[in-house]
Image: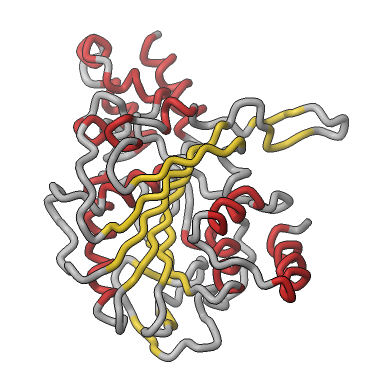
Amino acid sequence: MPLILALLILVATLGGCASNPHPNTGESADPGRLPSAQRLVNVAGLRPCNDDAARTLQIDPGQPINILVHGCNGSTGKFHALAEVLAFHGQQSACFDYDDRDSLMVSSGQLAHAVDALAQHLDTPAMTVIGHSMGGLVARKAFIESHPQPLQNTQIGLRLVTVSAPFAGIAAARLCAAPALRIATLGLQDLACWLISGDNWYEITSASRFIQQPGSLIPQVQRHLKVVTDERGTCRRRDDTGQCIEDDYIFSVDEQRYSLVTQASRTTDVEVPAGHVEIVGESGVTPYKLIDVFQREGIVRATPPERLSAFQALLAQLYGQ
């Protein structure tokens, strides 16, 4: 019975723990392909923000670049709309392509390697790494001093942005780390947790070293903007009568706040009343709150007044509103 209960809880919560909900529009154009793109590059782990087979990036080597990191059950294509928002403001993007069932330590090492490789193609390497949900865990861990596969380039200027990331561990996964239950089920509990979450099944629990020892950010990270979402009372889907039939609550504020991360140097903590999906947007839901935070905090350039109407038209096209 404890094992069945654990499975039910984990399936219900971890199944959507970090789904990055932008719709895949099916367009083949690279969202980071700005008019000034001058160079074609191929970097292991990075690709355009779409789900097409082509992996070549088209970049302007003289400009900074954003790297978007999806969460579990996500894909690079689901960041298509956000990359288009950035492109409208003259900011190029690439997406980190990884297996969200791998160990988070492995994935973060792959991200650090990808950043190093991309930096070789930039005249002045400056990047902003944006991770949503579990992607935020991967993004921050990639840039800690104690990482076994650390970033090598000491000249990179980095900004780190995490959104709705469960830095205190995922509460619904707590049974996976319960010693008595693991012993009582003769290893079946571990197997069940692995089947649901993959090799990161223990890392996402509050008992893991990955969570308990978040590490200090490397000097190259000039700033960590940490966006916390208060997801209470939010709704993702309503019926014809207006009743909520699917909430938008995945992580609590307590799951997203961990003192060793929140109080770290160079970290700015911003709380937003928004659902887990709402904050990054999906079809029918424009991420106005995230765009507002990004512009206030200098992550996205301000929209020129003369282009506001064009920007609203783009948002309507991307998000269907």
**Quarter-of-image position of residue 212:** top left
Residue at image x 25%, y 69%?
Answer: 156
Residue 193 at x, y percent in the picture: 33, 28
**In the depicted view, which residue is nearer to us: 233 or 294?**
294
Residue at image x 55%, y 87%?
Answer: 35
Residue 251 at x, y percent in the picture: 49, 30
In the rendered picture of this protein, how many numbered marks are placed on residues?
0
In the displayed image of the protein, which residue is found farthest to the right?
241
User: Which of the image's four quarters has the C terminus?
Assistant: bottom right
Residue 144 at x, y percent in the picture: 21, 49
* Residue 17 vertical position relative to residue 151 in the rendered view, above or below: above
**Quarter-of-image position of residue 258:** top left
Residue at image x 31%, y 30%?
Answer: 259
- The answer to whether residue 121 is left or right of residue 243 is left
**In the depicted view, which residue is nearer to us: 141 or 11?**
141
**Quarter-of-image position of residue 119:** bottom left
- The answer to whether residue 200 is left or right of residue 246 is left
Residue 292 at x, y percent in the picture: 61, 53
User: Which of the image's four quarters has the N terminus?
Assistant: top left
Q: What's the colour scheme?
A: secondary structure
Residue at image x 44%, y 53%?
Answer: 70
- The answer to whether residue 321 is left or right of residue 234 is right
In the displayed image of the protein, which residue is found farthest to the bottom?
38
* Residue 192 vertical position relative to residue 144 in the rendered view, above or below: above
* Residue 155 vertical position relative to residue 233 in the rendered view, above or below: below
